[in-house]
Amino acid sequence: MKFDRFDKILISLLAIAAVALLAYTAQSFPAKTTAIESRSMERELASQARVGLLEKLYSPVTVALQNGQYQEALLKLEEVNIRYPGEAHGFILKGEILYRMGVLDGAAAGFIRGIKLSGDYIDKNSPFSKRDIIAILVEKSLPPAQTAYKNSHSNPALKENLSNLNYLKSRLAGGCE
């Protein structure tokens, strides 16, 4: 087969188009990768900023809790909750304080309110994770709660407590709302 002038022009245009296509795709992939990396970095920075803010806001509560001053911790928590109502971290701390005070049904209710607002508290990999204390609470409280409910079906408080503990158990097992 003999190539004339027209065939040579078509072949060279095809070669130029192929080179341009390769150059275009080579430039577009790094831009997408950088956009993904920057979004990931933004999420990481936002997460670190949230951790820092919550540690700063709730530090008086945490210090009182670590010192075993549970009543004082509850009072300081109420002060913070007045300024930041509905913050999940406050409910989780309230659950932890009540757990340490031995008020297990109140602790379960506090943990549930916090977890419903933010699932980070049940996530193993979260810096906010309270999974271990919640697992201990469920393990310690569920059998007596089941027995108490079996003995008194008409008590709505027992039914609610059992429901709360079952909810926490399902969330620990990986269930969602």
Image: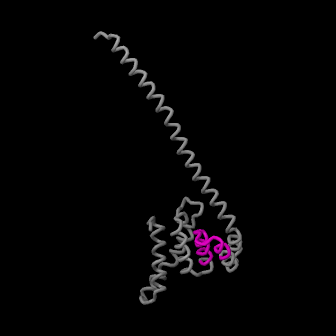
User: Could you tell whether 57 is left or right of 167 in the image?
Assistant: right
Whole-percent x, y for residue 129 in the image: 57, 64
* Residue drawn where x is 40% and y is 17% of the image: 12
Instruction: State yes or no: residue 111 in magenta.
Output: no
Image quadrant where one finds the N terminus: top left
Nearer to us in this view, 95 or 67: 95
* Residue 154 horizontal/vertical position (percent): 42, 90
Q: Name the residue at the front extreme.
A: 6
Q: Quadrant of residue 95?
A: bottom right
Q: Residue at x 53, y 45 (%)?
A: 36
Q: Residue at x 37, y 15 (%)?
A: 9
Q: Residue furthest left?
A: 1
Up the image or down, 58 lies above or below 98; here it is above
| Colouring scheme applied when the structure was drawn | one colour
Q: Quadrant of residue 120?
A: bottom right
Residue 176 shown left or right of residue 57 in the figure: left
User: Residue 53: x percent and y percent?
Assistant: 66, 62
Q: Is residue 83 above or below residue 15?
A: below
The residues colored magenta run 78-98
Secondary structure mostly seen in the magenta stretch: helix
In the image, is 134 to the left or to the right of 5?
right
Q: Is residue 170 left or right of residue 3?
A: right
Answer above or below: position of 56 versus 105. above
Q: Nearer the viewer, residue 49 or 158?
A: 49
At which x and y percent is residue 128?
Answer: 59, 63
Instruction: Tell me how many marks there are.
Output: 0
Q: Quadrant of the C terminus?
A: bottom left
